[in-house]
Image (cartoon, rainbow, N blue to C red):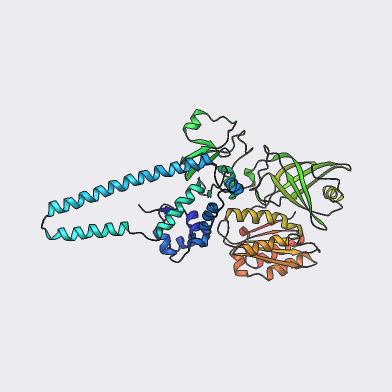
Amino acid sequence: MSHRLSLSRAAHLVGVHRSALQQMIREGRLATSEGMIAIEELRRAFPQAPLEASGAIEWVNRIKEESFGRRVRERMLPSQEVLAQRLFAQGLELAEMRRTVQRYHALVESLARAIDGELGGHPARARLGTLLADGLGRALAGDEADAIAALDDALRVMTPRVEVRPSGHEFQVEGRDSILQSGLKAGLKLSYGCENGTCGLCRARVVDGEAQRIRPHDYPLSEAERAQGHILMCAYSAITDLKIETLEAAGPADIPRQEVVTTIRAITALADDTRLLHLQTPRSSRLRFLAGQSADLGAATAAGDAHATYPIASCPCDDRNLHFHVGRDAGDPFAAGLFSGALRAGDRVTLVGPVGGFVLGPAEGRPLVFLACDLGFAPVKSLVEYALSADAAPSYTVAWLATRPDGHYLANQCRAWAEALDGFAWLPATHEDPAAGAEALVDGMDAVALARSDVYVAGPEAFVRAAEFALRGAGVPGGSLFTFVP
C-alpha cells in the first residue's frame, strides 16, 4: 500500500506553502486521493526537493543533539508517558504491517508453486514466472520515497497531526502541549473557556485515532459522551494522528463577551509618545478573541476611574498575555495614567471584550496586504502574527505610514519579519498628511497584485478613507477590502 500524506505534511516535507500544492492540484499537476498525496506522487512532482530544505531533518537532528537539554525536553518533546504511548501505537501499526507483508509473501510463494505445478511445460509458465519475479523486484526495490516515509513516521511520533471536522483545518501537536494549545498556536478558532478543564466548552469527539489525558479535569463527561469518544481538548494530547469533530468560531459573533480582571505585567516605552501595555490574565480566566479585535479597559487611578478602548496588538495564540499600543493623548485618561505613572506594574485593570469586527476574512490562500498609519499598526500586528501562525497566506505586505516622528515604533519587528520570511515585504513611509500619505502608498503598489489580494487598512479616519478610495480605484473589490478606525 502506498504511503500517503496529508496536504500539510507534504508541504512541510518538501518545504513549500500549502497554497502552492493546492494550486498544483487545481491545475492537475499533482494527483490526490481522498485529500491525501501518495509519496510517489510527491516525489514525481518534486524530484529535486531536498528534505533538508523543509527544516524537518535539522529539527529531528537538533532533538538528538540536545536530547538532554531541559528546554528541549519541555518545549519540543512530549512527556515520557505520551511518547511511550505514541511509540506503542506505532509499534502496533508496524506489527500489523509486518503480518500483512508476511501474508502477501506467503500468497506469492503459493502462486509461484501453483504456476510450477499447474502449468508444467506450458509456454506461459516461463512468462508468468518472469512477470512474478520482476514484480517482486520492483516492489522490494528501495527508492528515495522511503526516506520521506521514514521522516513522516518520525514526525508522526513527535508531532501527530490533528484534522478538525467539519472545517478540514489541520494542525500538529508539539511538545507537551494539549490538543487545544496546539490548535490555538496554529491559529485555529477553537471553542474554549477556561483552558484548565472546568468549563467543558472545549469538548470534541474523536472520530479516528487515539488521544490520551495528560492532566486532570473537573468537568464531568457523561458515560454516553465517553462512549461516543468525547474528550476535553485542554486536557488531552494526541497519541496518533487524529480526526476530531468540534466547532470553530466563524466570526466575531461566535466569540462571547467576557469580563476579566487582569494585572499590568509591564509598561514599556516603544517610543517617546508610545507605550506597550502588557496585561496578564489569571490562568483560569483567559481572553478568547480574534486577531484584530479590541477590548475595553478600565482602571481606578488617583485622578478617578479611567476607561479606554484599544486594539489588541498580540496574537490570540497567547490568550493570557495581551499587548496594547497606547499613544500619548491628554484627552485620554487611561493613556494619561500610563504616561504619568499613575498606572504601574501590578495594578489591576478590568478588561471587557472582545469588541470589533476587524478580523481576517474567510478566504484562505490569497496574498494579504496590510496598510497601517501610526497606531493603526497595533491591530495589523495582531492580524499578521495570527496569519503567520495559521500559515494563512502565500505572501504578506505591510505598508506602514508614519505621520509623527516616532510613527514606526516597531520598525525592528517589521524588519525581522521581512528578513526571516520568504514572501514578506515591509514598506515604511512617512508623510505629514495621512490622506496624502495613503494615496502615495497605494500609488506605489502593483495594482494587479492588489486586485488579487485581501487588503486590510487601519489608522486615522482620514488615512482609512483615502486609502479605501485609492484601493477601489486600483481594482480591489469591496469583498476583499477591510477597514478599521481605532
Answer with the quarter of the image where residue 305 lies. top right
Q: Going by the image, does 272 lie left or right of 400? A: right
Q: In this view, does 393 lie above or below 340?
A: below
Answer with the quarter of the image where residue 484 lies. bottom right
Q: In this view, does 357 lie above or below 417?
A: above
- Residue at 50% in and 54% down: 8
Q: Going by the image, does 344 lie left or right of 62? A: right
Q: Is residue 192 above or below residue 171?
A: above
Answer with the quarter of the image where residue 421 lies. bottom right
- Residue at 35% in and 46% down: 97
- Residue at 48% in and 44% down: 242
In percent of width and height, residue 425 lies at: 64, 65
Q: In this orientation, does residue 245 appear?
A: no
In percent of width and height, residue 209 lies at: 45, 42
- 237 or 245, which is in the foreground? 237
- 433 or 325, which is in the foreground? 325
Q: Going by the image, does 10 lie left or right of 289? A: left
In percent of width and height, residue 26 lies at: 46, 61
Q: Going by the image, does 55 lie left or right of 397? A: left
- Residue at 65% in and 43% down: 288
Single out the residue that lies furthest toward the right. Answer: 303
- 455 or 399, which is in the foreground? 399
Q: In this orientation, does residue 132 appear?
A: yes
In percent of width and height, residue 434 lies at: 77, 64
- 226 or 59, which is in the foreground? 59
Number of marks in picture: 0
